[in-house]
Image: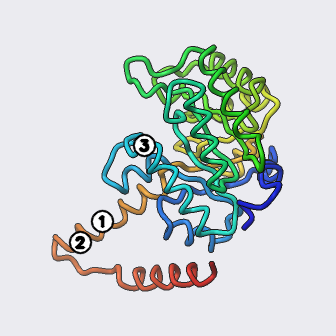
Amino acid sequence: MTGRAPGRRAAFLAMHVPGDPLVVPNPWDVGSAQMLRAQGFRALATTSSGFAAAAGRGDGEPGRDASLAYAAALVACVDIPVTADLENGFGDTPAEVARTVEAAVESGLAGCSVEDFTGRPDDPIHPLEAAVDRVTAAAEAAHRGAGLVLTARAENFLHGNPDLAGTIARLQAFQEAGADVLYAPGLTDLRDVRTVVSSVDRPVNVLARPGLHSVPALAASGAARVSVGGALMFAAYEAAAGIARQLLDGAELGCFDQAAAGARRLAEARSAG
């Protein structure tokens, strides 16, 4: 499979082209991964928020073993690269982060991301020196053997600190520490995307969200990868909730043609491998 083949790190990294971004949807389970693969995407990414929500839990709650098992299940069910959201590496220390990334390499993933979020709402971001040490350890683990593409995430914008200059300084430090791809989720302005892209020498992933929902606009801003996090899963849940409300309200249900088409789509995706 592409995601497991020798040289997978180089092959996956080569897909990251500034101005011609790799568009990576985020399946939340095996069925959605097979469906998205059948649509023609070249790579997939896990979603910590989507995976947790589908299990009735909050983002970050499933933990290391469950998250790695979910990622490995996606690797096993598709023949394209899979990159995993490994949250904060499931540990504070560089050694703990390295062990998580080593497990990701062994699972056959083509890439993974590690963020500088502490997991503590009252003190959400690791100090820069500690964050750099964690990325250094992750990069060393990621680049051994078959290796994988390491994405380093600066989480300021997601945790109440929209400090663009400080975020860029972190990304630059993560670049020097060995990260292959850089990511500052939470940006909502194309001008900020352009500033980030022009300030670093690594491919930049951008999270599509309100204000940044046009792939052509993100391409023109220099993004090398575009992902959507848990958006697809949450949109699917809202669509199902709308149909369920019709059922409760006694309205005429118009979902059966759509349901039949979806069942056919999944069957075709499974048969296509």
Nearer to us in this view, 134 or 197: 134
Circle 3 sits on which residue? Answer: 63
In primary-sequence order, the first of circles 3 and 2 is: 3
Q: For the residues labelled 3 and 2, say whether their Cβ atoms are less than 8 Å apart.
A: no
Q: For the residues labelled 3 and 1, say whether their Cβ atoms are less than 8 Å apart.
A: no
Quadrant including the N terminus: bottom right
Is 140 situated left or right of 186 in this image? right
Question: Which mark is nearer the camera, 3 or 1?
Answer: 3
The location of residue 140, given as percent across then percent down, is: 73, 33
Circle 2 sits on which residue? Answer: 246
In primary-sequence order, the first of circles 3 and 1 is: 3
Q: For the residues labelled 1 and 2, say whether their Cβ atoms are less than 8 Å apart.
A: yes
Few, some or many residues within 10 Å of mark 3 (<14, 14–19, 20+): some
Few, some or many residues within 10 Å of mark 1 (<14, 14–19, 20+): few
- Rendered image quadrant of residue 71: bottom right
Instruction: Identify which residue is drawn at 63% across, 81% down.
Output: 272
How far apart marks 3 and 2 lie (CA) works out to: 36 Å
Circle 1 sits on which residue? Answer: 242
Nearer to us in this view, 218 or 33: 33
Instruction: Tell me the kind of residue under disc 2.
Output: Gln
Instruction: Identify which residue is drawn at 21% across, 76% down.
Output: 251
- Rendered image quadrant of residue 58: top left
Quadrant including the C terminus: bottom right
The location of residue 261, given as percent across then percent down, is: 47, 83
Look at the numbered disc 3 and give the secondary structure of its residue: loop
Q: Which mark identifies residue 116? A: none
Give the answer, above or below, for where 245 lies relative to 96: below
How far apart marks 3 and 1 lie (CA) works out to: 31 Å
